[in-house]
Image (cartoon, helix red, strand yellow):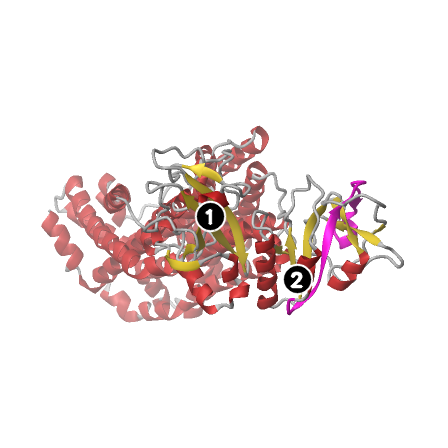
Amino acid sequence: MIRLGLRLTLNGGREALIRLIILVVSVGLGTGLLLISVSGINAVNHQNGRYAWLESSASSRGQAAPEWWLVTADYYQGQVIARVDVAATGTTSPVPPGLPRVPAAGQYYASPALAALLRTLPRDQLADRFPGRLAGVIGDAALPAPNSLAVVVGYIPATLSHVSGAQKITAMSTTPPSGCSGNSSCLIGVGLNANAIDLVLCVIALALLFPVLMFTGSATRLSAARREQRFAAMRLAGGTPRQIALIACVEAVLSSVVGTGLGFGLFYVLLRAPLASIPFTGAPFFPSDLSLSLIDVLLVGLGVPVAAAVVALLALRRVNISPLGVTRRVTPRPPGVWRVLPLLAGLGLLGWYVVAGRPHSTGSQIQAFMPSFVLVMAGLVLIGPWLTMIGARLAAARTRKPAALIAARRLGDNPKAAFRAVSGLVLALFITTVAVVSITTINANASGTQPTPAARAVLLDQAFDGDSANRVPAALLARLDGTPGVTGTMVVYQDPQERSIPPRTVGLPATRYGSLGAGLVSCAQLDRVRILGRCPAGAEAALFPVWGLLGNASSATLWPGATLPSGGRLTALTIVTGTDGTTAAIETARTILDNAYPAGEPPLTIGEISGQDMVRYTQYQRLADVVILTALPIAGCTLAASLAGGLADRKRPFSLLRLTGAPLGMLRRVVTLESAVPLLGVAVISIAAGFGASALFLRAQMGYTLSWPGAAYYLMTAAGVVLSLAIIAATFPLLARITGPDVARNE
């Protein structure tokens, strides 16, 4: 029977060959996307694991000779530079990964990307921050990404031991940032919580796989009527249900095995390298990060063919029950109202977490939210035929036109088959709605503000801790003022009266932002900086924000006036350097401040401060774009495959209608209505479910209130519907070709 199944699959004529090719391609596409999802999760964890050595601290216990260790962050044009200062106390001191040895005093190792910058930039813009000479490059084992900027600088122990923050370590940490949550030794701003990304990637995998499964299901139903007739004939000729099932499984397993191999080939040959260059986490991956474990390969390689065999067996229910039932075209049982329950259950489960609160651990959150979205998406697929039936009955009761009556009758007789063609698009609309609404809401609640172009040219250095009366040397300010491109400098001092600034001063609503912590600035210095506002007329000093929310400030901002206290020494909090916005001016001033206060926080532009708040949201936006741009084309392919298969199965009745005098235009209207009625009817429910699921998820997971998307979403939704109608219209030439007189005669 296996040999017979292979012969029927491979030698069944042109129609069988085309069907086999479509099956192989659809399974290959699904397998490729599945491998991308699995390898993406692996890549995030591999990348995050290479941040572990930067988490080394006194708690990293080992038997090696102690080593003085200090990790700080620096910046170049918005890119983070991970700087590690080390001083070995013996020959057995731990060696950072990617290095042949611990650098000696006066030497440093740089990542390839940073070494390239050091070779091309003037020394005063970057190289002067690192004492000594470049001794070599850091290997990939220590770099989270190919473009990572990192440097390991060598010192003598006597020098580094007196630097604030330096500590002794005896081993390199192997704990990634996501595994040391709550540990004071974790380096803030380095690495990411991979568990949070895992949650996002799991949702994305779900969003990608559902449309692929719908496409694969549609492809397996191509020429379904002919296959059922063939299997029914085999039953009448004496074939047993087990033999028929075996023949069907041979075809399904053959196409799935070849398709799985195609999916692996697509992943390793075509997709792996381009995907590695996409910065899903804010940084690209090494191609080797997108790896698959042996368990991953076995689960995908064996799971897909097994799933295909199960689907083939389920598709033979009518043949196994009654072979004559296929030829008699028995009307399927109408879908029941119970199909509403899974959708309501999924939304209800999300609502439960709004009331009861979300789980605290990421693993528990995945277990909580994934089933909710699975229920909602499965509910949309299940409720579709029932809504299609309701719409068909309403249309039949309200119309007298022949095309509408024929379409309504066909929809009412078999709403499952009618909805199956548009199910991929319905899911794509739900996925698009959830992605766009979630990103819109997250961005609306982001704490960062987009700075004005002038404010992006301002460099802030919060080099002091505020616990002592700090004085900024006049020579340092004079050197900054003399740097080409620097427009002026000023110092923000601590306000003894601890006053605050109303948010409306910089155009922010008081209902959303609290009062801004204020310091004191000299009006003479503020006038020299120019682009950050001005003092009231006649004022000696002004209240000025200490650090945050300066992005909205401009030369027209009027700060509240103040007076400098008489006597005593003021405590310096921040050095503010205004520039003309050029790279040379910003980076030269940053180098001067870095060398003046090596142990302080790195100087940042206002744009870089705002960018830190927006990085994660940009990552989510990028992932949402990937989901949308993948789901919509797959849905279009599902619609095209379903329409083509449906026309092929109905070419005889359509041909007979044309022979009886039905014009081709009427048949076109029938085909259009059969697809448009379920699409438009269920699309409304799908979009509403997307808004509802997003609102509940955002409230439960983040405490956010839903924000309505902009006009781009509605235009994209309308474009998707119009494109669907265009795909329907594209089948009209096929309809004309398969409904000629010769078809009816040959059938």
Residue at image position (54%, 65%) is 124
Locate residue 40, reporting x and y percent.
38, 49
Going by the numbered disc 2, the residue's amino acid type is Leu
Label tally: 2
Locate residue 151, reporting x and y percent.
44, 54
Q: Identify the mark at residue 85; answer none if there is no mark.
A: 1
Residue at image position (48%, 53%) is 282
Marks 1 and 2 in Cβ contact (< 8 Å): no
Q: Is residue 382 visible?
A: no
SS of the residue at dot 1? strand
Between 733 and 745, the residue placed more toward the observer is 733
| Magenta span includes 501 | yes
Left/right placement of residue 237 relative to residue 186 reads: left
Residue at image position (62%, 45%) is 706
Q: How far apart in space, not on screen, are marks 1 and 2 (Cα)?
A: 26 Å
Say few, some or many: other residues with alpha carbon within 10 Å of mark 2 (under 14 / 14 to 19 / 20 or more).
many
Q: Is residue 666 above or below residue 63?
A: below
User: Is tag 1's residue or tag 2's residue first in the polypeptide sequence?
Assistant: 1
| Magenta span includes 121 | no
Between 182 and 652, the residue placed more toward the observer is 182
Residue indicated by mark 2: 480
Locate residue 422, reporting x and y percent.
43, 54
Between 448 and 38, the residue placed more toward the observer is 448
Name the quadrant of the C terminus: bottom left
Going by the numbered disc 1, the residue's amino acid type is Asp
Locate residue 700, reporting x and y percent.
56, 36
Residue extending farthest to the top is 356
The magenta-colored residue range is: 483-508
